[in-house]
Image (cartoon, coloured by chain):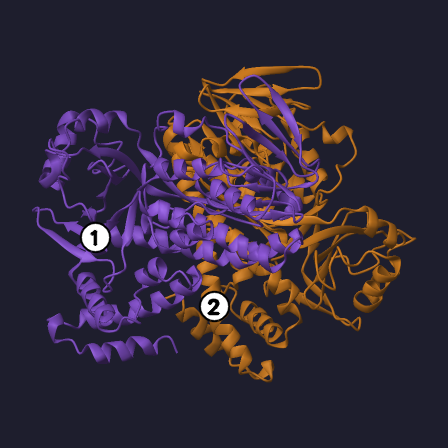
Chain colours: A purple, B orange
Amino acid sequence: MKDVVIIGAGLAGTLMAIRLAQRGHKVDLYEKRPDLRKTDISAGRSINLALSDRGLQALAMADLDDKAKELVIPMHGRMIHSIDGHKTLYRYSGREEDWINSISRPGLNSLLLDETEKYDGLQVYFDHDAARVDTINKDITIKTSDATAKLDVSDKIVIGADGAGSSLRREMQRRSNQLRYNFSQTFLDTGYKELCLPAGPDGTFQIEKNALHIWPRDGFMMIALPNLDASFTVTLFMRFDGPNGFDTIQSDDQIHALFDKNFKNVKNFFPDLIHEYRTNPSSSLGTIRCYPWQIDGQFLLIGDAAHAIVPFYGQGMNCSFEDCLILDRCIDADEGNWDAILKNFQSIRKQDADAIADLAEDNFYEMRDATADPVFNKKRQIELALEQEYPEYYSKYSLVTFKEEIPYHKAMALGRKQDEVLMKIAANTDDISQVDLAWVFETVKAVDG
Amino acid sequence: MKDVVIIGAGLAGTLMAIRLAQRGHKVDLYEKRPDLRKTDISAGRSINLALSDRGLQALAMADLDDKAKELVIPMHGRMIHSIDGHKTLYRYSGREEDWINSISRPGLNSLLLDETEKYDGLQVYFDHDAARVDTINKDITIKTSDATAKLDVSDKIVIGADGAGSSLRREMQRRSNQLRYNFSQTFLDTGYKELCLPAGPDGTFQIEKNALHIWPRDGFMMIALPNLDASFTVTLFMRFDGPNGFDTIQSDDQIHALFDKNFKNVKNFFPDLIHEYRTNPSSSLGTIRCYPWQIDGQFLLIGDAAHAIVPFYGQGMNCSFEDCLILDRCIDADEGNWDAILKNFQSIRKQDADAIADLAEDNFYEMRDATADPVFNKKRQIELALEQEYPEYYSKYSLVTFKEEIPYHKAMALGRKQDEVLMKIAANTDDISQVDLAWVFETVKAVDG
């Protein structure tokens, strides 16, 4: 049984390490950062995430779903805040049992790291930077604060779970011509800045706890996800340039004016708005696609290292966890034949990674623009009524989020067809209470011909 | 007047250096390779190219077009070699005065390098590798065989004309998040291998001199361009994998069988076929797109460094030379304001670089597959008749190749519309001599409404 080296003790790398240890592999997990359980949270990383069914299914593979559920706050829908402070909750699904979960990234990562300690064959090396992977000489240059050494991996499987700046992916870039390595990175002209909306003085949630809050505005938006300590992590998404842009809005007056005009109903909940706006970074948002993901049946990219996406579908972590599940199934199918395992994995998974990347970009425009559009909201209400009346009906959002047995690329294809039909129906409907749901159901079902 | 540093003394870098010296700038041109006039041709680089009207127009800007014309062999059309050895010449244009020119890359580069010596303010440094450009500290690390030094460029304009592996582009990659630097590289599954078809024993051309020869086959092709010494540079384009693939065809028997079956009419002209096939590399073919091309109105990519394309439209060099012409026009428009010059240049030029990249990929399939298709060849004949009868009509190929006053992106848009109409007409035509050309002309002209 092959020994495995995994680079990156983030979410995907740690889950994969645990699963491979459960399968009996000796696993060495290298992480360039210190142990996050013993340090402050690193600045600039999104500190809460949406965990949904695909992620939970993958955690269940390692028997960790119940433990994760102890850390979550359910979010049943989108709470849309209009500019005049009016709030409307649009549920994510017409089925009672469908919701998504707000979870702390470092909290979940800590849970996984704690779990690694149960396996004798699994060793985690913090502060060990796998700075260069050499797939020809089959070694990895590992840097620590006081030494640089080469790790011989000629007889090992190497998994790069080292995120958007992956060092294994850099090696693929270096060998581009030989591997005919296709690669793209695309940035949105919109960036993000995180702010903290703290708990109320009495430790209560200052806005609705069980929702993902959205303030959709003209060309920008703000969102908020709840934390266990009753605070919310708030993220402001704006362009860098132009009138409502991070580079433009810099003075105290401009920051106040932005919030007075657009986010008046929560402005007073930010005790430290000006300082946070000034101090917290405005970060960019990009999509990374590449192929191949593996070299020689020995070196493999998973997670963000293979497919970094924008955060607007809440699927980044879920997709990376699902990678671990699919890889585990590929190992089941071809146990011992790593060449087949890695090639099958990339060939199954590439189309799904591309689909969720597209969906995530689309959802940015949906959240920012469409959630303020009456026709879109009628369509959402028709869909929710459909899901209530016909539980076997899944909207695009539900297919992606709650229907983990359907691969992303199929969810996207079917969901887009359904959307087209439903938007037409919504545009021609004045009073949604008068819609003939049975007819709508048959019409929408027909697109899946 | 700003001093200029140019990285890369290839075709675009050297032409731009000459032009800027003519404008009165002090120019330092750094080239990592030795002076190609004093060394053998470096292996693996395509040794002849197609020079056409856009390239000639750019050379004319520096008064170098007439000198270049002394080095060329006109190619009036595509000579299509069928599998049974039948040859048909399809002219590139119905106008007598339209043709493209085969030219030696090192020959043309030598001409340009000779020209640099005429300008006191222009200095070329060979064997100087601009290994790293630092756009924050504004310096360039220059490596020679015996030293590494930093060149301060804080007060200079820096132009990266250093090809597909550009070190200035690497700096943009390093600063991706900050610059929101979009980038993609895409490889074809087809690669190429160069072979030499030498002059005949009496110094004559063994196949038609004034043509670009094509042997279109099922999923692969071979082409040949003439050289001044009566030899031809032959390029075999095949997939890497599969039955007719470089990785598959390796034994003497397989190489003989490939040529016996597909290239029988010229096989005996290759005296050294087996050895050359074995020894010459099978190289990959890729497209590189990126944006932005400039940083801070000071650092700029041009040529392949900004937009490497596949070679199938014969426009790589022409496009890079045209970059120099457009940049020169931008300098005219905003003389002294480099921020405006560089931003205008990238904003004008990006869409044209994207268009020629698309056209070049399309033309691979046209050359490989369509040139063997009867409907396509009928369409080409109708087009040539149109161009003869109505000289103001330009086919897509002619718009791209012979109509240098129309930008690539407009040539592509118009040409594609014309192609659509003409392919329909060709598909419905049995005898092209019976086509009503006046009607076709009016029909095709109407698409440009």
Q: Measured along the vertical axis of the image, is residue B375 above or below residue B416?
A: below
Q: Quadrant of the C terminus of chain A?
A: bottom left
Helix, strand, or loop for circle 1?
strand
Residue beneath disc 2: B418
Q: Horizontal placement of B214 versus A307: left or right?
A: right
Q: Which mark is residue B178?
A: none
Q: Horizontal placement of B322 versus A251: left or right?
A: right
| Residue type for callout 2 | Gln
- Same chain for mark 2 and mark 1? The answer is no
Q: Quadrant of residue B143?
A: top right
Could you tell me which residue is drawn at 44 percent across and 60 percent down? B413
- The residue lying toward the viewer, choosing from A91 and A17, is A17
- The residue lying toward the viewer, choosing from A217 and A93, is A93
Q: Horizontal placement of A5 versus B323: left or right?
A: right
Q: Measured along the vertical axis of the image, is residue A371 above or below residue A414?
A: above
Residue A258: image location, x then y, percent: 15, 36
Q: Quadrant of residue A333?
A: bottom right
Q: Is residue A207 visible?
A: yes
Residue A357: image location, x then y, percent: 41, 52
Kindly check if marks 2 and 1 are in contact, taking CB atoms under 8 A apart as contact: no
Q: Measured along the vertical axis of the image, is residue A446 above or below residue A251?
A: below
Which mark lies nearer to you, 2 or 1? 1
| Residue type for callout 1 | Arg
Q: Measured along the vertical axis of the image, is residue A195 above or below residue A99?
A: above
Chain of the residue on which disc 2 is drawn: B
Give the distance between the C-alpha atoms of the residues marked 2 and 1, in whole angstroms.
49 Å
Residue beneath disc 1: A78
Could you tell me which residue is drawn at 63 percent across and 58 percent down? A334
Crowding near pointer 1: few (<14 within 10 Å), some, many (20+)? many
- The residue lying toward the viewer, choosing from B418 and B95, is B418
Q: Quadrant of residue B319?
A: top right
